[in-house]
Every structure is written in structure tokens, then in C-alpha cells.
Image: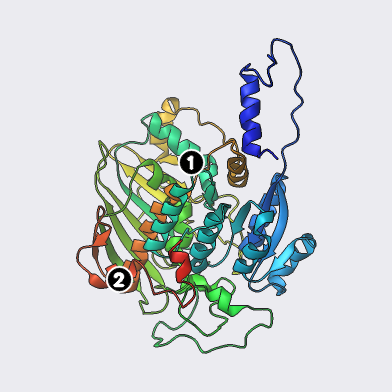
Amino acid sequence: MASRRDFLKTTSLLSAGLAFNGMDILAKNIHVQQPNIDKVKIAYIGIGNRGEQDISEFEKTGMVEVVALCDVDMGNIQTEKVMNKYPNAKRFKDFREMFEKVGNEFEAVCIATPDHSHFPIAMLALSEGKHVYVEKPMSRTFIEAELMMQMARKNPQLATQVGNQGHSEANYFQFKAWQEAGIIKDVTAVVGHMNNVRRWHKWDSNITRFPEADPMPPTMDWDTWLCALPYHDYSEKFHQGNWRCWYDLGMGVLGDWGAHILDSVHEFLNLGLPYQIKMVRAEGHNDYFYPYSSTILFRFAARGNMPPVDITWYDGLDNQPPLPEGFGKSELAANIPGTNQGEYRDAGLNPGKIIYTKDLIFKGGSHGSTLSIIPEKRAKEMEGMLPKVPESPSNHYVNFLRAVRGEEKTRSPFEINGVLSQVFCLGVIAQRLNADLYFDTRLKQFTNNHFANAMLAGSLPRKGWEYFYNL
């Protein structure tokens, strides 16, 4: 049976008036009835919490057929809604078993699992010829992101998409249009900030070991949850989103929110990797979980005719950045997903960014929020110079599915988002060491800290998981 890509190729040839089966279709004025294109057959890996939200968004497209559901905690309360919605989908706890038993029945996967498990699942999926949608951050270590980008380049026929959905919303198209029109130019500094209560905890930063083991939920496949990590006892402080807070498991606030705040800045300014990462603040620094508040300076070199750029990241409840004169009200981004850790609540200064150029200052929120020029007086002076911003042709989920069909290219593929993920990995290393680091962007090595270089790859994979690093 012909593939969808073959079908699209054939119909494009027909529309160009080329002969098909020896007949000139256009000359004979024969009407060609185009058959309905099949839905994308998809498997979901991670179906609770954020996974449930992704599944709901894919369902809204009307473009998917759900083949399989996979979750290490299948049957626990957070998975029940999706299980009930798709009673005929095949169910698995171990993604490896899912690929082995029904891998020939689906063509794409959506991965919404903890950060440390993105790498092995995505690598296996690509090696099996599957299109991959994976939640941000793309990876937990620098080397993992490097390997994922290499795998994607080796398989250009496969669509990859990282779940920073703002890359398909208004900010993405506005930034691009304003840059092309010369409104955004000569950027010299960017401030990223996330100071809301969500994602913070009240654990003791003087801890000297990991938490004591808690009783294991009867539904949990803990060994598969850990994936390649060294063994940790099960703890409620690791489960249900708490994993974001631990160096071994997640990427902290920087990895979680940076992808929603700094994505367009990083891509369209062609920033690449920083040559210096400087820790300015690390309140509550310890060896196990992320600081209560962090200020991190990333320094990027000049690129072509664009000047050097400093990006300063602020997180923590008591660590808001200085605001420029005329900043005005901090707007809350639309459609911020809720979490099992609570809905988003206004913090006075909502997550966002401030962009400084030689002539103008811009402020913006997170996700798809658009930029505005500040102060207001300057914005009014610029009104007549602003170009029309095109509307997005597809949201992030439709964009991925159309890319699977060969109709669009994904806007946040591994090759683009992977470098941004590596920036966050470098920031996390600086957080963990609480040190100022210098990085050779050509050799991709730190030049002043051997411990930091060892952390580029992270810990050695557990026995049996080395396979995924050799694919």
C-alpha cells in the first residue's frame, strides 16, 4: 500500500499537469477524487498529569488514532481518565515492551515522562522509525541532547518536535517578523524571569542524603521509571512532578520554564552556546536539589553582524530582576497549563523576558505571549513602523502531525531545540557546582573545571541501559 508521502507526491504531480498512467489528466479534464488521508497512528508514553494534557490537545486535532498507552504507574489515579477514554488501546508499563510487541502498529509517539527518561525513549523511537513529539526540556544532559540531535539528522524523514508550544504561537511569528523588519536588532542583553510559587518546595537545604524510602504504590514499575539512572529508593518526593526539583531527575525551573521564555530569543538571534556561565546567586545551594532561588548569567559571543549578548536568568520567590523605567504591568501569558502542583497564580511579576537593544527595550511573557515596546510613549512613536505579523498556520500539535504527513516542517525540531536544551544543561551544571564556568563552544568542553566536564555526560547508565547510548 502506498504511504501518505507517496500519495502526496503523486497528487502534487497531478496538479502540475504531468501524465499519470499514460494519460494527460488536465487535457482530458478528468476529475481526480482524492481519498481521505488516514489518521496518524500514535502511542502515548506518560499518560498522567502533563501527558493527559498533551493527549487532550492531540485529540482536539481529529488527526490521530490512539494505538497504545504506556505509563509506569498505569492504573494509579492520574492515569484513569486517559485509560477510560481509550479502552481499546493496548496498555503497557514498560516502553521497551510496547515497542517490541506493537511497534509495527503505530508511526508516532508522544513522550510526556520525567526529564531523565526523555533520552532513552526518544532514541529507541527514532531507531525504530517513529516520529517523536517529546515534552521539554528535550534532555537532561548535554551529551544526551547531542546524541538526540545526531540521531535526528541521520533520520531526516522522521519528524521531531519538542513541546515548547509557544514556538507555534504569536510570539514566534511576531519575533521573526519584527526582526526581519529591523525592529528587533542589535540585541545586547536579555533578562528571563520566573518568580512564581509553582515548582518550589520547602525541603531542608542542609540535607546530607536522599529521602528515606516510602511505600511503593502497587501500580508502580519503579525500575522502568528510573531508566538509566543509578538506583534510588522510591520516594513521594521524587514522584508526581516532584522530580523536577532534583539534579538527578529533572532540570529545575530553568529547564522547565526557560524553554517557554527564551526559545524565540535563542533561535532568531542565532545564539548557539555560551562561552561563560556565571552563578550570581544560589540561595539554599546543596548537593541534591536545585537552589530556592538562582541568578545565572550566560554570555554569548558576537555572531556575524550581531553583537555579543548577555542573558541573565532569575528564578525564586524573592529574586525578581530589576525592571526598566516604564515597564508597566506584567501580563500573564494565556493558556499556561495547570499542574498537579497547583494552578498558576499571579506573582506580581509574571514569567517572561525583557530584551534590551541599542535603541529599544521590549518586554514579553512566557509561552506564546507577544512582545511590546516600553515605555508606552516609545511604543506609540513606533506604531507606524511595525510590520503585519502573520497568523500561525497550525498549533504545535497540528504542526507535528502535518510534519508526519509531509505537509509542514516542525518548528521546534531536535536540531533547533537541542542547542537550547544544551544551554540549560550548562546552566544546571553551574547551579550544581555553584561555580563560574568558561566553555569552549567549538570543542564543547569547559576550559576551567574538570568536574564540570565530567557532568556533561551525567552519571554512567545502569547495567542494561548502555544500549540506548550506542544506538
Which is nearer the N-term, disc 2 or disc 1? 1
The x, y position of residue 163, in whole percent, is: 54, 53
The x, y position of residue 435, in whole percent, is: 26, 70
At 62% from the left and 70% from the top, the residue drawn is 94
Q: Which residue is mark 2?
A: 454
Secondary structure category for the residue under label 1? helix
Quarter the N terminus occupies: top right
At 45% from the left and 85% from the top, the residue drawn is 210
Residue 369 seen: no
- Between residues 461 and 168, which one lies in front from this camera angle? 461
Q: Is 100 on the left-hand or right-hand side of 85?
A: left
Farthest residue, direction top: 27
Q: Residues within 10 Å of mark 2 (few under 14, many from 20)?
A: few
Classify residue 32 by image quadrant. Answer: top right
The x, y position of residue 52, in whole percent, is: 67, 61
68 over 289 or under it: above or below: above
Which numbered disc covers residue 172?
1
The residues tagged by marks 2 and 1 sit, at their Cα atoms, a distance apart of: 35 Å
Which numbered disc covers residue 317?
none
The x, y position of residue 301, in whole percent, is: 24, 48
At 54% from the left and 63% from the top, the residue drawn is 121
